[in-house]
């Protein structure tokens, strides 16, 4: 099963490539798998966004060095993050918990555009395919039908997270692409019993980690615990500190 999954992942990533491609890179499992496969077929540049010393910055640096790929580090401070938040809100007047995820996307797309890229790969959809969020384990404890929830959330990604990322990237004439949002890959994963997809709450995404190991993903990444972009980049604490002001200045419409 892992061999078949690895082949499907490779095919999905290869189908998303241009000769020159940018990868939104956190040093996490999803983006590192994408970079590992993409570099075999394209000229790849990695773009990581975060606060100085953030976890994403540290892991991205280590993973990029092991992959021998160029890494562009977009280090943001409070001023830059707040400015990007306002620009994201102008494009998508969403609530704070949604916009904080899009600020690193905005900064990465802007940097990729400045480097003359026209397409950028994102790891979106991996969480839904491989049960990467802790809330799925809470749903399971509550006796809910997690498999149906995962399928529905996967199906609606183009109207939610992926749609928002695409709009942010279009602002910079960047085509956002999502290799994990792939019909063959979805059919294969949703045929795997939910118990197998959720057998390790601590690390999560065991099946994807096994595929990553087979594909040559650096060991430091395979052992890294899941951390969402807003936490790994360090922007969550910053925006929570300014939440009252942000909610007043940039209300969700």
Image (spheres, rainbow, N blue to C red):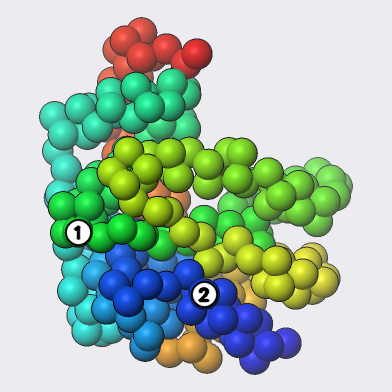
| Residue 138, horizontal then vertical, whole percent | 70, 47
Q: Quadrant of the N terminus?
A: bottom right
Disc 2 marks which residue?
A: 15
The label number, if any, that marks residue 11 in the structure image: none
For label 1, count other residues whose C-alpha is less than 10 Å away and answer few (under 14), some (14-19) or many (20+): few
- The disc, 2 or 1, on the residue closer to the chain's N-terminal end is 2
Asked whether residue 63 is in view, the answer is no
Q: What element carries label 1?
A: loop
Q: Name the residue under label 1.
A: 116
Q: Residue at x 37, y 72 (%)?
A: 18
Query: Marks 2 and 1, how far apart in space?
Result: 21 Å
Q: Where is residue 78 in the image (x, y as percent from the top left)?
A: 17, 32
**Quarter of the view holding residue 85:** top left
The answer to whether residue 106 is left or right of residue 129 is: left
Q: Looking at the image, is 81 positioned above or below residue 66? A: above
Q: What's the residue at 37%, 43% (across, down)?
A: 170
Q: Position of residue 246 (x, y in %)?
A: 32, 17
Q: Which residue: 20% across, 27% down?
A: 83
Q: Is mark 2 on a helix, strand or loop?
A: loop
Q: State whether residue 194 appears in this view.
A: yes
Q: In which quarter of the image is residue 2?
A: bottom right
Give 16 or 123, whichever is nearer the viewer: 16
Please identify the quarter of the rendering in which residue 43 is found: bottom left
- Front residue of 53/96: it is 96
């Amino acid at each position: 099963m892992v061999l078949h999954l690895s082949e499907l992942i490779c095919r999905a990533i290869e189908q998303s490539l241009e000769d020159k491609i940018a990868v939104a890179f956190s040093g996490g499992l999803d983006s590192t798998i994408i970079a590992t496969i993409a570099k075999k077929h394209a000229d790849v540049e990695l773009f990581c966004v975060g606060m100085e010393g953030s976890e994403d910055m540290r892991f991205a640096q280590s993973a990029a060095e092991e992959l021998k790929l160029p890494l562009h580090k977009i280090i943001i401070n409070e001023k830059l993050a707040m400015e990007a938040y306002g620009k994201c809100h102008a494009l998508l007047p969403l609530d704070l918990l949604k916009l904080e995820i899009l600020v690193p996307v905005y900064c990465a797309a802007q940097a990729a555009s400045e480097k003359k890229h026209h397409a950028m790969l994102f790891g979106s959809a991996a969480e839904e395919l491989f049960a990467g969020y802790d809330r799925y384990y809470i749903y399971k404890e509550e006796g809910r039908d997690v498999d149906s929830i995962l399928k529905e959330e996967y199906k609606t990604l183009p109207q939610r997270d992926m749609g928002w990322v695409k709009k942010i990237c279009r602002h910079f004439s960047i085509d956002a692409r999502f290799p994990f949002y792939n019909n063959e890959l979805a059919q294969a994963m949703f045929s795997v019993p939910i118990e197998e997809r959720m057998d390790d709450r601590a690390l999560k995404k065991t099946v994807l980690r096994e595929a990553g190991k087979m594909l040559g993903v650096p060991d430091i990444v395979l052992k890294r615990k899941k951390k969402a972009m807003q936490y790994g980049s360090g922007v969550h604490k910053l925006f929570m500190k300014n939440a009252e002001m942000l909610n007043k200045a940039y209300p969700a419409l």
